[in-house]
């Protein structure tokens, strides 16, 4: 994916790794939650994965959006320059 970005806008390796590692950690969390829940129920693990994925893709994204907007507002209000989202220094 990194090589699909235009060369003049391409993120450095460290920033690219930090961005993509968050996605990998989220996918691992969903996977282990699915394995754990499938052991507790008699449900098909694939249907539990679909439910977990749909919840993560809808409610999870909404909660993250609300959280980021709230924290961004607080950071702007307090003028904490080092805590701005997307500013890596």
Image (spheres, helix red, strand yellow):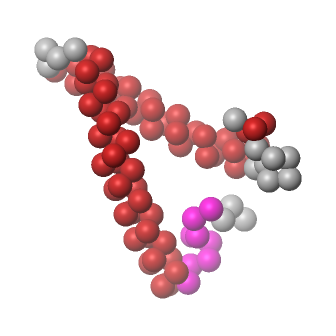
Quadrant that contains the N terminus: top right
Which sits in the foreground, 57 or 78? 57
Residue under the point 39% across and 33% down = 29
Q: Which residues are magenta?
A: 79-86
Residue 66 picture quarter: bottom left
Residue 52 seen in this snapshot: yes
Q: Where is residue 7? Give x, y as percent.
A: 85, 47
Residue under the point 76% across and 50% down = 11
Above or below, comparing residue 53 to residue 82 in the picture: above
Quadrant that contains the C terminus: bottom right
For this orientation, the residue located farthest to the right is: 8
Q: Where is residue 21? Give x, y as percent.
A: 58, 39
Q: Where is residue 59? Give x, y as percent.
A: 30, 49
Residue 84 falls inside the magenta stretch: yes
Q: Where is residue 62? Give x, y as percent.
A: 35, 55
Please name the predominant secondary structure of the magenta segment in the image: loop
Residue under the point 62% across and 77% down = 81
Above or below, comparing residue 65 to residue 13 in the picture: below
Residue 39 seen in this snapshot: no
């Amino acid at each position: 994916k990194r090589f699909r970005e235009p060369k003049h806008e391409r993120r450095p390796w460290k920033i690219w790794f930090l961005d993509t590692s968050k996605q990998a950690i989220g996918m691992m969390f969903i996977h282990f939650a699915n394995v754990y829940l499938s052991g507790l129920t008699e449900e098909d693990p694939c249907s539990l994965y679909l439910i977990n994925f749909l919840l993560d893709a809808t409610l999870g994204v909404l909660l993250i959006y609300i959280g980021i907007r709230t924290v961004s507002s607080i950071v702007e209000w307090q003028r904490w320059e080092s805590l701005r989202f997307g500013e890596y220094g």
